Image: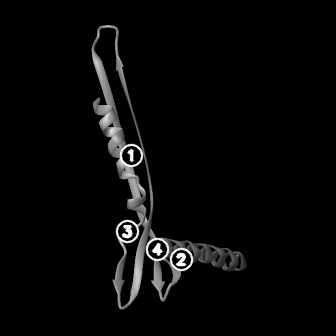
Amino acid sequence: MSKLDDILAGARDSITVRKVYGDPYEKDGITFVPAAAVGGGGGGGEGEDAEAASGSGGGFGVMARPVGAYRIKDGEVTWIPAVDTTKVVLASQVVAIVALLVLRSIFGSRSE
């Protein structure tokens, strides 16, 4: 097996269902199963030039973020979404900036 095959096998092993769902844990009779969004990709190449010098290369990346958890209580399953506070803060900043620009254009046109 070449180095490229090893790299791609590692990428394939990194993106599995075991990375999406965490190990369930129980507390006070409630079972939680954490879940994440996992994505990734990889690539590479091998080749030889006319002088019989060989080459190879490759790489891969994996990205994961929490999306929520399943709660199992008394045989009933409930989805609890994760809150991405970074997105909430950024969205509120964008709304505030737009509001300030609108107010400036309203009050700026009255003073002229």
Marks 2 and 1, how far apart at CA = 38 Å
The kind of secondary structure element at disc 4 is: strand
- Residue bearing mark 2: 92
Marks 2 and 4, how far apart at CA = 22 Å
Q: What residue type is labelled 3?
A: Gly
> Which mark sits nearer the N-terminus, 3 or 1?
1
Kindly check if marks 4 and 3 are in contact, taking CB atoms under 8 A apart as contact: no
Q: Which residue is drawn at 41% across and 54% down?
A: 16
- Residue bearing mark 1: 12
The x and y percentages for residue 69 are: 45, 75
| Camera-nearest residue between 83 and 93 | 83
- Residue bearing mark 4: 68
> Which mark sits nearer the N-terminus, 1 or 4?
1
Q: Which residue is drawn at 50% across and 85% down?
A: 75
Marks 4 and 3, how far apart at CA = 11 Å
Q: What residue type is labelled 4?
A: Gly
Question: How crowded is the residue under tag 4: few (<14 C-alpha within 10 Å), some, or many (20+)?
Answer: some
> Which quadrant is home to the C terminus?
bottom right
Q: Which amino acid does label 1 sit on?
A: Arg
